[in-house]
Amino acid sequence: MRITLTTAGSYGDVAPYTGLGARLAAGGHEVTLAADDRYAPLARAAGLAFRALPADPRATRPADGRDATPTDRRALMRRAAAFLEQLGTGLADAVPEDTELLLLSTTTAPLGWHLAEALGIPSAGAYLVPTAPTRAFPPVLSGGRSLGGWGNRTAGRLSLRVVDRLHARAARALRTRLGLPPTSPGTVRRRAEAANWPVLHGFSELLVPRPADWRPGLRITGTWWPHHPADAQLPPALEDFLAAGPPPVYLGFGSMSSAHAARLTSLAVRALRRAGLRGLLLTANSALTAPESPSDDVLALPAEVPHALLLPRVAAAVHHCGAGTSAAVLRAGLPSVPVPFTGDQPFWAARLTALGTATAPLPLTALAKDLSPDDAAARLAAALTEATTTAALRTRARAAARHLATEDGPTTALQALPDLLP
């Protein structure tokens, strides 16, 4: 079967589909990944065909660099709408005409429904976050705090309406181009829900147990780990640093950027030294920078390195709680110090804390704005000490790692393919 996977966003929104796609291809299917062209090397390294989508979220950032990672809800909405309009212009061109099954991410699904309708082909969701309303937990973009059963489900329904509005202009333009009659995104979404449109979710039930009130067709498969070549290795300088002392603490914020990078870097170095720990700073993006004064106890990592190779060799992880990073930290059996920035990150931070594998979250706004530099460094140092010395955190993290080792999300997704077809 010829399958096209469509996704858009940052590295964490794309990389899991390389692992899923590689497993589908190993199962005998022809798989194409459609994403921003920065990720063409990832797709081809996984043995997948690639089609480019005009969907680089960086292109919608202000030219002066301000508001690089907005935490204000209105700023997020403005950027999201601009990003979706850009995405909608190219989705029709990115999907090969001979596609027999269209697998859609949370971002591409509200546009992909129209394309599947025009092409007359089946589609299904391939989601990295839960989106269906439920009493069990609040919407992933609501901050992670439960609103009670009725409140969670009501907020979930409202969040879907917000998504409908964000996609309205992009969907209208796409339907016009495809020659489809006008209709609203909400109408198309409700039609899909009424038909029990199938969705595979690429995360673990350890973090998000399947809610009892989810409709039929919604399935949690387990995590889709990014594909890495079998011969992948850590850089020699990193190997030397790891061998030179006790396991360090990993500090990395994925694809996040921040106007407070210099302050965050200074806080990280001060907190590490206050806690008596060595540290690895991921500076591949602009949320952290290389320390001003090089030292033997802190190493800056200027490029992405595979989590699967690095994380099992560190003592704990300070991270932004993206879905993929949260799962990777658990897979390595590590305690977390959550520093959520925005989006779904507070949700995953709350899940890690509830699981008992993380300290209390330290939101970016607290470290970068609300606390003085001295108080912020003290808070981070205390969290580092807790994460690296509390036996209960380590025990629960290792138990989580054993559980994740029993799951095979891509194979479960492969086995579910017949259920996705009419």
Image (cartoon, grey):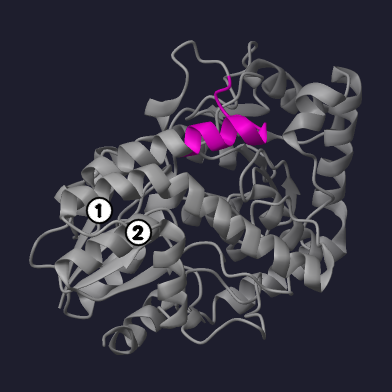
The dot on residue 175 is: 1
Q: Which mark is residue 5?
A: none
**Which span of residues is magenta-colored?**
67-80
For image coordinates 65% across by 36% down, the residue present is 73
Q: Report if residue 106 lies within the magenta region.
A: no
The amino acid type found where label 2 is placed reads Thr
- For the C terminus, the quadrant is bottom left
Residue 257 vertical position relative to residue 227 in the rendered view, above or below: above
Mark 1, secondary structure of its residue = helix
Percent of width and height locating residue 332: 60, 61
Marks 1 and 2, the one that precedes in the sequence: 1
Three-letter amino acid code at the position of disc 1: Arg
Q: Nearer the viewer, residue 221 or 66?
A: 66
Circle 1 residues within 10 Å: few <14, some 14–19, many ≥20: some
* Contact check, label 1 and label 2, Cβ < 8 Å: yes
Residue 332 horizontal side relative to residue 89, left or right: right
Which label sits on residue 183?
A: 2
- Residue 281: x and y, percent? 60, 31
Q: Is residue 55 visible?
A: no
Q: Along the horizontal axis of the image, is 215 left or right of 370?
A: left
In the visual, does 284 lie left or right of 161?
left
Q: Nearer the viewer, residue 267 or 130?
A: 130
**Magenta-span inclusion, residue 69:** yes
Hey, which quadrant is residue 391 in on the image?
Answer: bottom right
- Quarter that holds the N terminus: bottom left
- Identify the image quadrant of residue 26: bottom left
Please tell me how crowded label 2 is: few (under 14), some (14-19), or many (20+) other residues with Cα within 10 Å: few
At 67% from the left and 41% from the top, the residue drawn is 248
Front label number (1 vs 2): 2
Position above or below: 373 against 95: above
